Image (cartoon, grey):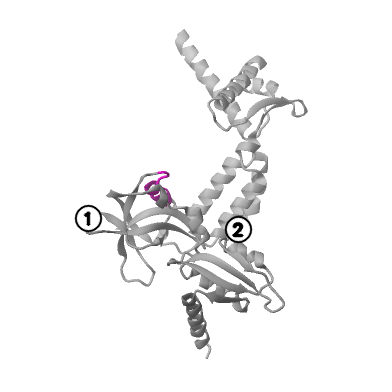
Amino acid sequence: MEDKKTVKDKDGKAEVQRILDSYTKLCEGRIINKEEAALCYGVDERTIQRDIAAINKFLAERRITGAADMREVKHEKEMNGYVMTGLEDTLLSNSEILAVSKILLESRAFTKKEINGILDKIVSGCVPKESMKLVKELIGNEKIHYVEIDHESYIEGKLWEMAGAIGPGLEKRNLLEILYQKQETSAEAVKRIVQPLAILFSEYYFYLNANIVEKNERGIYVPKYEYPAVFRIDRIKEYRRIEEKIKIKDSDRFEEGEFRKRIQFMYMGPLIKLRFKYSGKSIESVLDRLPTAVVKRKPTEQDPAWVLDAEVYGRGVLMWLLTQGTMVEVVGPPSARQEMKTMLQEMLAKYE
């Protein structure tokens, strides 16, 4: 014969299991009918009522502690049961899930194994159960025909570990020693000591933005160049933290968003102020592509071209300007104009 403590423990476990089960159903957007739930769990309707009250108390306490959680369980007469309201504030909508999934598939940033795992988690965790089948069908064909980039290694774990080396608001930034394969044609990988600054994504790949550092005459690590370098994360073969750090002044703190406005195709180089003419029909496309671009002159009868200034890093912007064909002309600085001219001459030579 079971003693009273054993019976009480079993009852307590059953209660916890019942409440958690109800909470899960509500989070999935399902309706709890009091009468049906009572029959299912073998309890009376007052017990189900107390379970709902316990869930609401839990949600209310989360709001008191400052959690941005506006969920609440309410009885909806039209639905003949209890539903959780406020889910729309904590979950992505069907439309948002579909949009995010399409962007991820189009980015081709992950291996097929990684993208399938990510999409399955997003759909299962955020989409209301009744819409899950439709969303899966809408992205299912693209998942099957997804073509991954030829990554040399998985990058998912590297992203988080390198983000830890960056760390938000650190006065001193960790240094990393990396073994980096420059290109597939390179015979050997090179070692670099770097000061991580940010993780960026562009044109199919994730990049580590970092200062290459070296020791000065006092044996202290300092940046080697005036501008940072970018490393494709899938080409980082090995990496480890080293004990020494670089102290960062507030005035020198790296602004990822500002940097991102000034770089194209992740080609680094000195920061320059580029002036160019654009005679195409969509000035908006230029301004969208180059966030730092400023219109200096609008088209006139004498010169039907826009004149723009843009602050940019390196030669990546010249590569993009080449895609605009005869609609662009680099005006200055003289070094950029000459480089553009040389590139065009070399291109033309291939067809002569």
Depth check, mark 1 against mark 2: the one in front is 1
Q: Amino acid at mark 2?
A: Glu
User: In this rendering, does residue 1 appear at all?
Assistant: no
Give the overall secondary structure of the magenta segment. helix
Q: Is residue 338 left or right of residue 18?
A: left
Where, by quadrant of the figure, is residue 63 drawn? top right
Q: Is residue 36 left or right of residue 64?
A: right
Is 245 rendered above or below residue 91?
A: below
Q: Residue furthest right?
A: 78
Residue 30 or residue 89, whichever sits in front: 89
Q: Mark 1 — residue?
A: 219
- Circles 1 and 2 in contact, beta carbons < 8 Å: no
Q: Secondary structure at mark 2?
A: helix
Q: Amino acid at mark 1?
A: Gly
Residue 192 locus on image (x, y percent): 31, 60
Q: Secondary structure at mark 1?
A: loop
Whichever of callouts 1 and 2 sits on the residue coming sooner in the sequence is 2
Is 342 rendered above or below residue 243?
A: below
Residue 234 locus on image (x, y percent): 41, 59
The residue range painted magenta reads 157-169
Residue 103 locus on image (x, y percent): 59, 55
Q: Residue at x 37, y 67 (%)?
A: 182
Residue 211 or residue 51, whichever sits in front: 211
Q: Is residue 159 magenta?
A: yes
Where, by quadrant of the figure, is residue 326 drawn? bottom right
Q: Mark 2 — residue?
A: 142
Distance between the alpha carbons at the discs numbered 1 and 2: 53 Å
Q: Is residue 90 magenta?
A: no
